[in-house]
Image: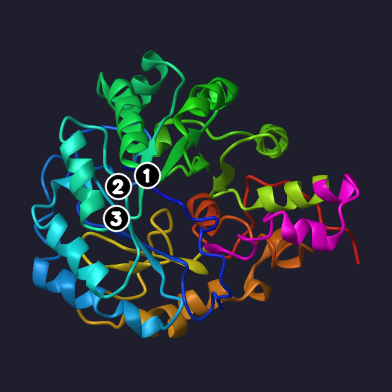
Amino acid sequence: MGTSHTHDDHPRHVVRDYAKSPMNIYWEMTQACALACRHCRAAAVATPHPMELTFEESVAWLRQIPGFGEPLPQLILTGGDPLARADLYELITEARRLNIAVSITPAATPALTHEVMARLKQHGVDGLGLSLDGSTAHRHDSIRGVPGTFDRTLQAMGWAQELVMPVQVNTLVAAETADDMAAIYELLKPFGIARWSLFFLIAVGRGKVLQPLSPADAEKLMNWIHETSRGASFILATTEAPSFRRVALERMREAGMTGEQIRLSGATRSHGIRDGHGVMFISNTGEICPAGFLPLAAGNVRNSDIVSVYREAPLFRQLHDPTQFEDRCGVCDYRTLCGGSRARAFAASGNPLASDPLCDYEPPSK
């Protein structure tokens, strides 16, 4: 399930040093999945990888998370489809025993039943992530690769309302989907969701068959997201498009808001979070990466401590420090606030420190 991210902010409004502790740890529990989504980062397959982490290995690395100290990161279970892991509930129980908050992003397959959702809630899962990439069955299912996923997704959103489970909806933003955003927004309104995260395409895995937005079209859509968020009953945010923070801040300043008013609006909650800084990713085979869409391994949970890797590995140290960034992102006056998508920079150039090609903002000359 490629768009499982929640990563541009988090409901716990706490002070956190992102160089010391991530806000979110994404765990790709398995690559096994019954869907064939056109933009899947994992290029998920029908069966688990032969080197997938065992139950014992999984428990061992989960027990490293408390080493970050308070406030603990949130654990987000992704895939593939985490429901494909036979030991899913035992692993959730272990995480909750360690006082780690857990969310899950299941695939919309027949395995996602009302009974399963109720069981996830009983095991202490805090939230559910669902993907909705079109306002109609035709548009959504053509992206997801399997007929019926649109109807199952809406059904799951309705069950979540019944169960009082907070839901984040993740929506792919690409050239093929951008004109559908307003209709998707209208579709989401009755469902009482907590958050709508618009994931701006990174061309990796199967995602290479889709087309990203141009910088100009991305900026236009970000302005629409900001305007729409002002009247929305749920949070609107972006994933892999941190330049939205610059757009929103510019709009709020133009509206005459003071720094304190901007802070109180909650708009600054995600500032500074980016791949490898506030976010880390554990692959199904244990690789420790800055993000799912930035597949550079800085270690493996089988033989590395995740706290040490996050704080000390050279790759993570570079990503913690925006003065290390290159080209336009390196001199940008918004580099601390935004920092650009390190995953998109890597996908475009092979260099995670390069400029984010989605943004064409020109920093003022010194």
Q: Position of residue 76 (x, y in %)?
A: 34, 57
Task: Using the numbered discs, state the Cα–Cα distance from disc 2 to disc 1 in whole angstroms.
Answer: 17 Å
The residue that disc 2 covers is 42
Label 2 CA crowd tier, 10 Å (few <14, some 14–19, many 20+): many
Task: Using the numbered discs, state the Cα–Cα distance from disc 2 to disc 3 in whole angstroms.
Answer: 23 Å
The secondary structure type at the circle numbered 2 is: loop
Q: In which quarter of the image is residue 266?
A: bottom right
The residue segment tinted magenta is: 252-274
The type of residue carrying mark 3 is Val
Residue 257 sits above or below residue 215 on the image: below
Total labels: the figure holds: 3
Question: Nearer the viewer's eye, disc 2 or disc 1?
Answer: 1
Q: In which quarter of the image is residue 326?
A: bottom right
Question: Nearer the viewer's eye, disc 3 or disc 1?
Answer: 3
The residue that disc 1 covers is 129
Label 1 CA crowd tier, 10 Å (few <14, some 14–19, many 20+): many
Residue 95, numbered label: none
Note whether residue 31 is visible: no
Q: In which quarter of the image is residue 162?
A: top left
The type of residue carrying mark 1 is Gly
Q: Which residue occupies 41% across, 70% down?
A: 73
Q: Do the residues labelled 2 and 3 touch (CB within 8 Å)?
A: no
Q: Which residue occupies 91% across, 49% down?
A: 256
Q: Which residue occupies 28% across, 80% down?
A: 64
Q: Where is residue 219 in the image (x, y as percent from the top left)?
A: 71, 38
Which mark sits nearer the N-terminus, 2 or 1?
2
The residue that disc 3 covers is 125
Q: Is residue 291 left or right of residue 342?
A: left
Q: In this view, does 327 lie to the left or right of 315?
A: right
In the rendered image, residue 60 lying in the magenta stretch gets the answer no
Which mark sits nearer the N-terminus, 2 or 3?
2
